[in-house]
Each structure stands twice: as structure tokens, then as C-alpha cells.
Amino acid sequence: MANVFDTLKERGFIAQCTNEEEVRDLLEKEKITFYIGFDPTADSLHVGHFLALMGMSHLQRAGHRPICLVGGGTGTVGDPSGRTDMRKVLTDEDIIYNCNQFKKQISRFIDFNDGKALMVDNGDWLRKLNYVELLRDVGSHFSVNRMLSAEAYKSRWERGLTFLEFNYMVMQAYDFRELNHRYDCKLQLGGDDQWSNIIAGVELVRRTDSKSVYGLTFSLLTKSDGQKMGKTAGGALWLDPEKTSPYEFYQYWRNVDDTDVEKCLALLTFLPMAEVRRLGSLKDAAINEAKSVLAYEVTKLVHGEEEAAKAKAAAEAVFGGSGESADMPSFTLTADELTAPVIDVLVKYGIVASKGEARRLIAQNGITLNGEKLTDDAVKLAESDFSGGSAVIRKGKKKAYRLVKE
């Protein structure tokens, strides 16, 4: 079996590593325990977490034991990494609820049977810490000058950095030491924006316990133009089907840019790399085959085979067949809305971001109603548009929505 480090590197996961040679050797010779932390800042994981879960799954398949650390403690502070403002402070009830939601979603990717993986909450130790003892035993190992040089803090320095957030690095470093004590955890993984926090944990364990532990970061999931992937008109691309439907999830991946297809296949599916390269090398109209495979495989991993098949069938019906499917995004209109201005309905249900966008799209022939291009931004819906009980609105070539009579 190939060393999982080589697998991760070939597929494009690895961004930085504390000591590449030693980590590769460790994963070759031992079955280790490793961890990734998930702070409960929302009630669902999103596509950025999906990449981390794929990395964890590769390691587990190679025989290593994952710890999924949910941030019942760090979630009370909020990570300043990648932020231009302070995160909303969550209530204890929010944190508990969000952690439970995470556990359900993570279980789709990680096998927790027979102790093959652990789900741990850092609130179990962080909430019990004595502040004076923490300052004395842990704080003495942190240089404020060095902390301020970290990108997470440096980018916030001008705008204002609270003392609350300043402690986040200390808390995450403490997590690594605690997991090493409790479970002999030797490796921390995370997105590349976590590099400074991960290094802090590696150094804390070395200084306090004279042990070698390691850190590895994954490349962030970005488009070819450098922007983060997973942003939609409605916000993040969530793993919760109630927040992003399987059909919408499928359609997102079906519509990725041609230049991003091979990278997404490598990072977000388990297809062999030979097949990834074959699909990624397709050109022009043929690349649509690769996009369909990507959309199906990714949706299957997140939502299951049945939902992936339904999403694929719905997309083919909408864009290559009858033009309508019960599985496409649907909105039920009230009686008043059945004769309302079309642009009001578009804005209310998030099909467009604003009336200005709606008017621009209509002027560019970018909105159709039941297959007919709208040319007047003042046009209203009519009862006759709902023959059979529903109407189909298309936004551009790639997005379609079903409007249903109440």
C-alpha cells in the first residue's frame, strides 16, 4: 500500500508540513492518532470542512485513527483567522446544538465503530481551566511578539484585536497538548490558514513535555482565480440538505469552471488518479462528462447515492429533457404572489440578490419563464403561467427553479 502522505501529496492536499521527511516516515512506520478541530460557529459544516473530512478519511483508510475535535471550548472565543471583524459570541445552547449537528455530518465520512475514530469536545478541559494556572504553566511559553507576527493577528491589528481573540492560539495549542496526553495524538491537521495555530501547539508540546509532535496543513479549496470555492448567491455551500439541497449541491459542482475540474476530482472524490487525470484532460464540450462525474461523486459522498442519483436525474430533466423536475429547487407561492411582479418573486426567494440584478438580467435576456425570455422588468405573473400547478424560472443557462401554486 502506498504511503498515505504520498497519496495526499499527489492529490494536492498538502500545503505545509512541520517536517515532511519525519511526518512521511511516521505515517509509514506507525498507525498514529491525529486530529482536526471543528469550531461550532454555525449549525452545519460547509464545503471547506468537506475537504478536511476527505483528508481525514484518506488517513483513516490507511489505518490511522482520527480525532474529530469539536470546539465546545474554543467556540466560546472564535478563531480570528481569516476574519476582518470579531466573530459573533455564541451562547452555550448554540454551541451544544451546533456540535451535535457536526457530529451527525462527520459520521458520514469517518467510521467511529470499534474505536476506529474518536469524537471529542475541547470544552471538557478548556472550561475547567484555572486562569492563573494557565497563565503560569502555558502562557509563559508564548511570545507576544511572535504571536503578533502571525497572519491571523497581524491582519487584525489595525482594525482592533480583542484580548478574547488573542487567547485563541493559546487555547488551540493547549488542545494539542491535552490530546497528546490523553490519546497519544501526534499530528494536527487543518486548513492552511491554521498554520500559526498548529505551529504553536507543536512548540508547546516540545517545550512542556520534550516530545516531538507534528503539524500539516491542507491547501484551501480555491478557484483558479484564487477566490474561495463554495460561495453561492445564497451564501455558503452547506453540507446540511436543509440549508443547501442535494440538487443545488449537485448543480454547484456541475457548473464549476473547466480549469477547476481536475483539482476538485482529486481533492473531493476517491476516484483513482489515473481516472482523475483522464477526466481532467477532456476539452471543450467533452469536459461536461467530467463535470457530471464530479457532481455525482461529490453529492454521493455528502448526501448518499440515492440523493445523488435523484439530483443527477433532475438536472438532466431540467437542462436536457422535459425542462422540469420535482427535485429542482422549489418555492411555494401564496395566492397573492401568483399575480405579483416577477422581479419581486425573484428577490423574495433569493433567485437574484436584488431588483437591480433582476432588471439587468432581464435586459440581457437572462431570465426565462416557462421557456419564454422575459423582456419587460415590469411584467407580472399570471394564473395562466401555472398550468399543471407550477412554473419554471431559469436564471441564465445553468440555474432553474420551480414555482408552485400554494
Image (cartoon, helix red, strand yellow):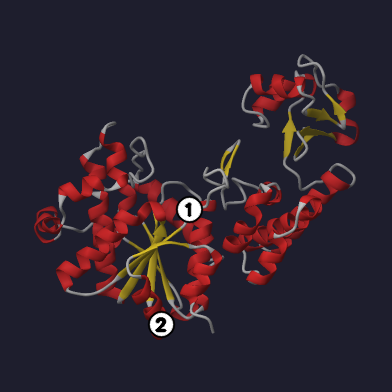
**Residue at position x 83%, y 29% in the image:** 369
Residue identified by numbered label 1: 220
Instruction: Please name the amino acid that badge 1 sits on.
Output: Leu
Residue 244 in percent (x, y) is at: 62, 46
| Horizontal arrangement in the rendering, residue 189 relative to residue 165 (left or right) | right
Q: Locate the N terminus and report the quarter of the image it occupies.
A: bottom right
Compared to residue 34, the image places residue 70 above or below, namely above
**Residue at position x 52%, y 44% in the image:** 226
Viewer-proximal residue among 149 and 403: 149
Compared to residue 79, the image places residue 112 above or below, namely below
Label 1, residues with CA under 10 Å away: few <14, some 14-19, many ≥20: many
Residue at disc 2, secondary structure: loop
Instruction: Please name the amino acid that badge 2 sits on.
Output: Lys
Compared to residue 58, the image places residue 126 above or below, namely above
Is residue 77 visible from the viewing direction of this image?
Answer: no
Residue lying furthest top in this view?
378
Residue identified by numbered label 2: 31
Measured in 3D between alpha carbons, the distance from the residue under mark 1 to the one under mark 2, in whole angstroms, is 26 Å
In primary-sequence order, the first of circles 1 and 2 is 2
Residue 195 in percent (x, y) is at: 34, 56
| Horizontal arrangement in the rendering, residue 361 relative to residue 80 (left or right) | right
